[in-house]
Image (cartoon, rainbow, N blue to C red):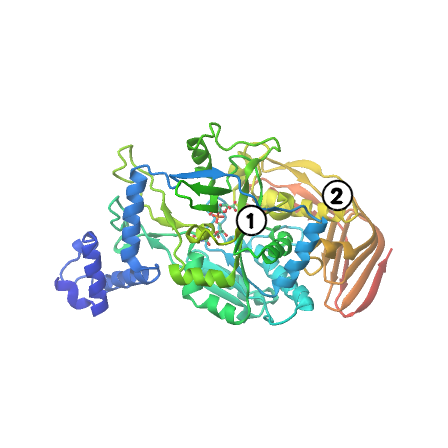
């Protein structure tokens, strides 16, 4: 009571609310006024921040937590009453007529799209010290994930504006959700690289706040063990992105600028943009309110499964069921073996890769009702089977792909399955854990993420008529991977399967030990025989024809041990470095027409 004089009227109300919600322990240790007053005020400021950054305020957080903790204690199945079944969606095959039709439609729509990159995660599984966006997506060019994403969006912007009709925005906006763990480093990466060619005003950083930790089943907030004037906090999950986009006013400003689609994506998938034109086309042609991008998934693989859930009361939804819940749900509903591969060698439940395309108008309408709040879950680690105490404090979490859970069943929710080799190769696991992945399942490591880029580019060129040598199997950091020729192009060279076909007009042969790098929009490969390394860089306006036979010693992968601290973390986590012996490097830095022959 005596300490009330330290607080403003609003702060007193907040404190009273907390007392009413059985949170008296937060203040019980407060000494007389005059002692620790500054710390007390900082504490109240933190409480205000926790209150304002959660939809419905702290009171809602505490009440939601109490309910979810009670359900967890009672062992209540979140899917109780629902029967899972395999949903139907659009299954695409790279390069066929349907795929090309969707890609064309997608490129048209790109100009009406806003991109949202969720990048607030620390990447605990990966164990990398820096932000994941700064990691090289591949080490042949060293392009980091953020640069690659931004270049792809700019390339989409150029390609789309050439086809633009009617009202559309001049620049494609990019919002990046950061957190205290990633914000400063993300901003620094952008600023020190001139936003990788984007206008600064095109990029909007939205920082998610952490949420209060919970100390017991009554949702009593946990004080930080090292500071009694601080509530312990932890990340709330990528589901925060919806509330942030809504409360910041970003969605309404996009709507006024003519945006129709909002495309969400994750921080470390170097293949992603190869799948974006077609998946955007599916959204547009099918008129989906929600379109989740998916890939074929091995049973029990650690990615969520897209599932149709039908309730006894008639409700039904197509939703991601997290991998740790899908198997028990199937077992509990009459599938004795749980999640198993069918005759195709894959689980019938496609893998959610957490790339979502939402139609903006119905999205805004829905968020007006929910303020962006997403169904949450809690995952306490109990001390024992009585479930009365936790090993350490817990918190509520939410996932962005749970957005469709609150939608009316009439909402058009669909999904698009892409070839995995084309669409999905995230970098999530550290070398040690990756090496333990059961044979046949993807490693999702820096090693496999990089190899997947070379494989996808090699396969794409093959499907466009090039003769690309078979890969060699090699082991790096205990992971057996296929090493394809290191073929890399930047998105300005080609975004779609048709672009690649156009740029590859004649014969093209590439040996397994070769490296081919193409940077520039107007590089035409008329005839190429490559056994070694060729790097072509062409500035805007430089039209280059390649008509050559190139043979040199090239660039090679040299194994590196991930435990070798003398090697940079970005390199040793992939288990190899690139040794550059020699190469032909062509740089065209002025506009004009050029032909390279040899
Ligand atoms: N992220 C945030 O921005 N904020 C957060 O608080 C947490 C994460 P993870 P996760 O691709 O295979 C997801 O940690 O959550 C960002 C899907 O839920 O890489 O374990 C973070 O920066 C799962 O269904 O993945 O699993 C990153 O960009 C499956 O699709 C993104 O959120 C799985 O991804 C994902 O965070 C997958």
Specify the quadrant that holds the N terminus.
bottom left
Q: Which residue is mark 2?
A: 513
Q: CA distance from mark 1 to mark 2?
A: 38 Å
Q: Pointer 1: residues within 10 angstroms few (<14), some, or many (20+)?
A: many
Judge by depth and name the residue closer to the eye, 320 or 567.
320
N-terminal label among 1 and 2: 1
Q: Which residue is painted at 32% across and 63% down in the image?
A: 52
Where disc 1 sits, the SS reads strand
Residue 299, placed above or below residue 171: above
Q: Pointer 2: residues within 10 angstroms few (<14), some, or many (20+)?
A: many
Give the total number of marks visible in the rendering: 2
Judge whether residue 296 can be spotted in this image. yes
Q: Is mark 1 within 8 Å of ligand 1?
A: no
In the rendered structure, the answer to whether residue 128 lies left or right of residue 545 reads left
Q: Which residue is painted at 65% across and 59% down in the image?
A: 105
Specify the quadrant that holds the C terminus.
bottom right
- In the image, residue 506 lies at what x, y percent? 84, 53
Q: Which residue is mark 1?
A: 415
In the rendered structure, the answer to whether residue 370 lies left or right of residue 464 reads left
- In the image, residue 222 lies at what x, y percent? 27, 50
């Amino acid at each position: 009571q005596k300490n009330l004089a330290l607080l403003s009227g609003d702060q007193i109300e907040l404190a009273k609310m907390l007392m009413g919600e059985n949170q008296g322990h937060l203040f019980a240790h407060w000494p007389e006024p005059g002692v620790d007053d500054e710390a007390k005020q900082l504490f109240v400021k933190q409480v205000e921040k926790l209150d304002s950054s959660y939809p419905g305020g702290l009171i809602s957080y505490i009440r939601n937590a109490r309910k979810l903790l009670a359900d967890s204690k009672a062992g209540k199945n979140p899917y109780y009453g629902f029967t899972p079944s395999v949903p139907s969606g659009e299954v695409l095959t790279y390069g066929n007529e349907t795929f090309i039709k969707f890609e064309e439609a997608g490129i048209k729509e790109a100009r009406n799209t806003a991109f949202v990159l969720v990048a607030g995660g620390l990447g605990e599984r990966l164990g990398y010290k820096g932000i994941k966006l700064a990691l090289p997506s591949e080490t042949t060019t060293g392009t980091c994930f953020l640069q690659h994403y931004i270049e792809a969006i700019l390339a989409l912007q150029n390609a789309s504006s050439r086809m633009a009709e009617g009202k559309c925005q001049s620049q494609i906006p990019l919002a990046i959700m950061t957190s205290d763990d990633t914000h400063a480093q993300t901003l620094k990466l952008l600023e020190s690289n001139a936003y990788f060619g984007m206008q600064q005003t095109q990029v909007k950083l939205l920082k998610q706040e952490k949420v209060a930790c919970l100390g017991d089943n009554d949702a009593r907030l946990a004080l930080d063990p090292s500071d009694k004037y601080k509530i312990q906090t932890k990340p709330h999950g990528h589901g925060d992105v919806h509330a942030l986009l809504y409360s910041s006013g970003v969605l309404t400003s996009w709507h006024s600028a003519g945006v129709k689609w909002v495309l969400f994506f994750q921080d470390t998938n170097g293949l992603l943009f190869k799948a974006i034109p077609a998946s955007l086309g599916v959204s547009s042609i099918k008129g989906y309110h929600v379109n989740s991008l998916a890939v074929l998934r091995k049973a029990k693989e650690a990615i969520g499964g897209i599932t149709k859930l039908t309730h006894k009361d008639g409700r039904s939804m197509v939703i991601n069921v997290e991998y740790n819940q899908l198997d028990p749900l199937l077992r509990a509903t009459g599938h004795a073996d749980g999640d198993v591969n069918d005759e195709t060698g894959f689980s019938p439940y496609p893998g959610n890769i957490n790339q979502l395309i939402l139609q903006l108008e119905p999205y805004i309408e829905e968020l007006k009702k929910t303020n962006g709040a997403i169904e949450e879950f809690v995952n306490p680690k109990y001390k024992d089977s009585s479930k009365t105490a936790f090993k350490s404090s817990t918190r509520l979490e939410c996932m962005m792909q749970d957005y469709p859970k609150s939608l009316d069943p009439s909402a058009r929710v669909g999904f698009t399955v892409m070839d995995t080799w084309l669409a999905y190769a995230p970098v999530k696991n550290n070398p040690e854990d990756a090496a333990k992945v059961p044979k046949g399942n993807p490693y999702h490591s820096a090693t496999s993420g990089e190899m997947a880029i070379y494989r996808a580019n090699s396969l794409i060129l093959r499907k466009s008529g090039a003769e690309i040598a078979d890969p060699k199997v090699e082991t790096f950091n205990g992971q057996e991977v296929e090493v394809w020729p290191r073929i890399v192009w930047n998105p300005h060279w080609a975004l779609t399967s048709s672009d690649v076909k156009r740029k590859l007009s004649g014969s093209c042969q590439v040996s397994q030990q070769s490296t081919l790098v193409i940077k520039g929009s107007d590089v035409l490969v008329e005839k190429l025989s490559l056994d070694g390394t060729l790097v072509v860089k062409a500035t805007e306006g430089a039209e280059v024809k390649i008509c050559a036979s190139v043979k040199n010693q090239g660039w090679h992968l040299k194994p590196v041990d991930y435990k070798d601290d003398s090697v940079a973390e970005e390199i040793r986590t992939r288990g190899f470095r690139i040794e550059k012996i020699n190469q032909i490097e062509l740089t065209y830095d002025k506009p004009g027409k050029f032909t390279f022959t040899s």
